[in-house]
Structure formats: structure tokens, C-alpha cells
Amino acid sequence: MLIWIIRKFFPSSTDGHNDLPWNIRRFAHNRLEYLNLSDGLDRTEPWNRSPWSQTDLPRMKRGLVGAQFWSAYVPCEAQGLDAVQLALEQIDLIQRFSDSYRRHMVLVVSSTDISAVHRNGLIASLIGVEGGHALGSSLGVLRAMYALGARYLTLTHTCDNRWAGSATSTETGLGPFGRAIIKEMNRLGMMIDLSHSSDTTARDVLRETRAPVIFSHSAARTLCNSTRNIADEILREVADNGGIVMVSFYSLHITCTRSSTIRDVIAHINYIRSIAGIQHIGIGAGYDGIDSPPLGLEDTSKYPLLFSELLKDPNWTEEDIMLLAGKNFLRVFKSVENVRDYWKRAAISPFETLSPPTHSSCTYMPS
């Protein structure tokens, strides 16, 4: 019954965040010859010994994954050093493994691409850059990453950058160069991801942007009092903005402990729905970047179980499940593209704002 419902209304689920590319870097040094995603990595060393490994093609297929954002993640320790290079290498990796497994997945760059790939029964593979420090404070790098296929940027990670504050420093917001970043992302048609951002940054962005925002992997702060989660007032602002919160499955963000269950995740989904509305929720599990997934949602094969559990609640209809599974995300993606197209018709030129110059042993010349 569940599989019929999903395939009738929205062929498969969309997930906003997966850290498999970083694990490929850690375990295989980005060498795909050391990796076979078509086999179950849960039976292959060193993946089967890692608490951070929950993704491979067999499990994604059992999970009816139809669209997956892969994270081109850059650690905060690389900021001001080789962050741009690392990001480009991770983007290259996502491009290469999408091509290597083209019988199963296709790299896509638009909302219409996702729909076309679904019709062919393949997984739509998408790129998100995690950590604004990966830009090296350069609008040129932002544009280059968009040209390479990146379709969202997580403005911060677990550190502030030169133009935006992270959840680790709740009072730091968006600087002047950060406002130029937001405008250029609107112009390009690149989604703004506020997961990891401070409350102040999130509020600043919501005032600045002309396009809907996303939280690619976050949960409700009222249920787990972590600055990584979203306060009620910001949930309301996201709804007003037309954006989406894609719910994380990380136990530390769900129960603020090392353990959680599928019921705890459902509590966050229901809570966010009660504040922001059914039109503004999605799924952003964060698999391969979490070492304590919930009981019942241990890996990428488990999405149907989540939807099945929700359908036991009379407050959830089949159409509601389709909105959560991917229709909401597609709407946001299309809205971001509509803003891009409007600005293109208005002949808005690329923004040429420069970040404040830096002088250090790691720079050849200031910006």
C-alpha cells in the first residue's frame, strides 16, 4: 500500500543532506576504484565498521530514494587554507560517482531534471556545498560552484566565517559581504541553506532574500534545546518566506542525547508542521554524517517505514505524505528558479562586491 501511494503521487522521496562524499574521502581518498556502491557497504570493510556509514545503492533503492543532495563538505579547520580546493574536489567526486553509477543515478541541476529522472526510475543526484568558508569570500568562486552544478550553499558550518555567524555564536549575523552573497545566490538560482546558521544570521537572511530558503538538516529547538535546531519564531518566518525545513535524523538534534527512535523523529515532524504548516517540511536525514541514527531509521533503506508510521496517524493524509516526501522541496526549488528567471528578465548583472581584503601568509594578493 505504502509503495503504491508513493509511486502514484510522488515516485520516491527527496533527502536534503547526505555526507557520503566525505566518507569516500576519509575511507577511499576519493578513489572510486576502492568503492563499489552497488554492493552493500554494510558488508564491506572499512564501511561496515564505521558508525558513520548508512548509505549505498541497495539501501537507497529499498528506501525509495528518488532525489539525494550530496554534501560537498569542507571542515572548518580548512578555512583560510585549502577550503576552496577541498570543496572543488568534493564537487568533482560527486560528479564522478554520479557518472560511474549512471545506470542508477543522474546528476541534475534543475527542478525539471528531477521530475524527468523520476519518470525514468533513476535517482536524481544533486550537489550542495556545506560551509560558506568554502567560497574563500569570493563571489567568483560562488558562481564557479554554481556552474559546476552546486544548487545550495550551507552558509556556515560549525564555525563563523568572515561574513556570517554560525550556530556556535548566536549573536553574530550576516555581514555586508554576506548580504552580497545572498543577492548573488538569488540571481543565480542557488538555494540558501540556513542549517548551522545562527539565529541572527537566519533572521538577517530572511529579511534579505527574495527567494525561499531551506534548512537542509535541522530539527525543532523546542523539542531539543540545541542552537543547531530552529526556534519557533524562525519556523514561522520560514513559513512566511515560503521555505522548507528538512528534518534531521541525528539523535543529538532529536533528543539531545546519543539515542532516539523513529517516534522521536515523528515528534519533530509533527511539531514543525504545527508551527510552520504542512507546506514547509521535508526530510534531510544527514546519513553518513551521523553516528547515532534513530532506532527504526538506521540507514537510507528506512524512509518507507517513516512514511508508513505517519500514515497510521489520522492527521496525516496520503497527500500530506507526498508533500513531506518531496513535493514541498520541488516547490521551493522551482520558486528559487522563478526568482532567478525574473532577475534574468530584468537584466540584473552579476554582483561585483568584494570582501574586505586579507593579508596573510596564505594569500598571494588581497581580494
Image (tube, grey):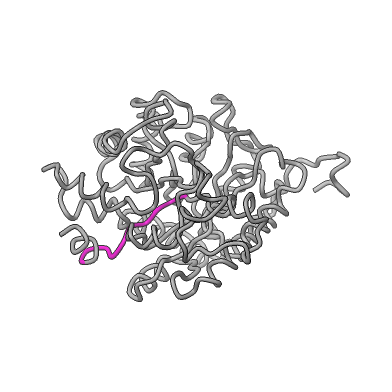
Q: In which quarter of the image is residue 80?
A: top right
Q: Quadrant of residue 245?
A: top left
Q: Where is residue 247 in the image (x, y as percent from the top left)?
A: 37, 42
Number of numbered labels in the structure image: 0
Whether residue 54 appears in magenta in the rendering, the answer is: no
Q: Position of residue 277 (x, y in %)?
A: 26, 41
Is 279 rendered above or below residue 236?
below
Left or right: 84 in relation to 212: right
Q: Quadrant of residue 40?
A: bottom left
Front-most of 178 and 228? Answer: 228
Q: Can residue 84 be seen in this view?
A: yes
Q: Where is residue 130 in the image (x, y as percent from the top left)?
A: 57, 47
Front-most of 299 and 200? Answer: 299
Q: Which residue lies furthest to the left in this view?
A: 314
Q: Position of residue 69 (x, y in %)?
A: 47, 56
The quarter in which the N terminus is drawn is: bottom left
Residue at x-position 59% and y-position 33%: 165
Left or right: 211 in relation to 280: right
Residue at x-position 69% and y-position 54%: 352
Which span is picked out in magenta? 8-17
Residue at x-position 86% and y-position 39%: 360
